[in-house]
Image (tube, helix red, strand yellow):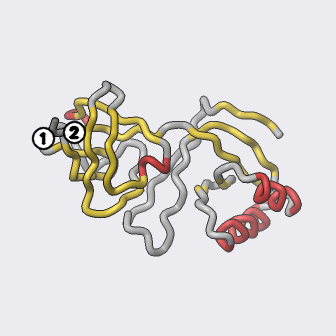
Amino acid sequence: MVLPCASIHRSSGCWPKHEATGTVTLLFEERHRRRIRLITDQGEEVLLDLPKAIAMADGDGLRLHDGRWLKIQAAAEPVVEVSHRDPEQLTRLAWHLGNRHLPTQIGRAALRIRPDHVIEAMLESLGAKLVKLRAVFQPEGGAYSSHGERHHVHSDASAHRHER
């Protein structure tokens, strides 16, 4: 059986969303791939075969060889939201995360990381407020990212929060 193949990726706003014939909902790790077998939300198997790994984001599109488009949907996943009442100290917290090469999503008033009890203890010792929740995770790509553009992910008002 030959699977439909998706070999073209377009960022949100750069493809005809109204032409989407299906969706595929993926965690961040699953969205940062070059080649993998995917199952769409409609149950169809598709081969993702991109020229290079790309950190796909919510709203991006994949074009199949037969001309159909699939919309990427970012799945909510466990994350830790890191904040501090002092914006200058939040910048220092971001530095500590970057110094440890941790994937970090940067927002206006908070950072998001994956759960890690050692890192969480370090952040708390530096005065951070931590909130565990389920939300979209789209970390920065870094200076040498192959993606070439920054995706803005807005906090999901319906995110399930667990106060610490």
Q: Nearer the viewer, residue 164 or 7?
A: 7
What is the number of callouts on the image? 2
Three-letter residue code for mark 1: Gly
| Residue at which label 2 appears | 69
- The location of residue 139, given as percent across then percent down, is 54, 57
Where residue 142 sits: x, y (%)? 50, 69
Q: Nearer the viewer, residue 26 or 87?
A: 26
In the picture, measured across the screen, residue 69 lies left or right of residue 97, that is left
Mark 2 near mark 1, Cβ–Cβ under 8 Å? no
Q: Hey, what amino acid is under mark 2?
A: Trp
Name the foreground residue: 22 vs 45.
45
x then y, percent, for residue 119: 76, 59
| Quarter of the C terminus within the rendering | top right
Instruction: Name the residue at 31% across, 53% down.
Output: 35
Question: What residue do we see at 52% from left, 51% from top?
Answer: 138
Image quarter for residue 63? top left
For residue 32, which quarter of the picture?
bottom left
Report the residue marked by disc 1.
Answer: 67
* Figure quadrant of residue 121: bottom right
Residue at 64% in and 51% down: 114
Distance between the alpha carbons at the discs numbered 2 and 1? 7 Å
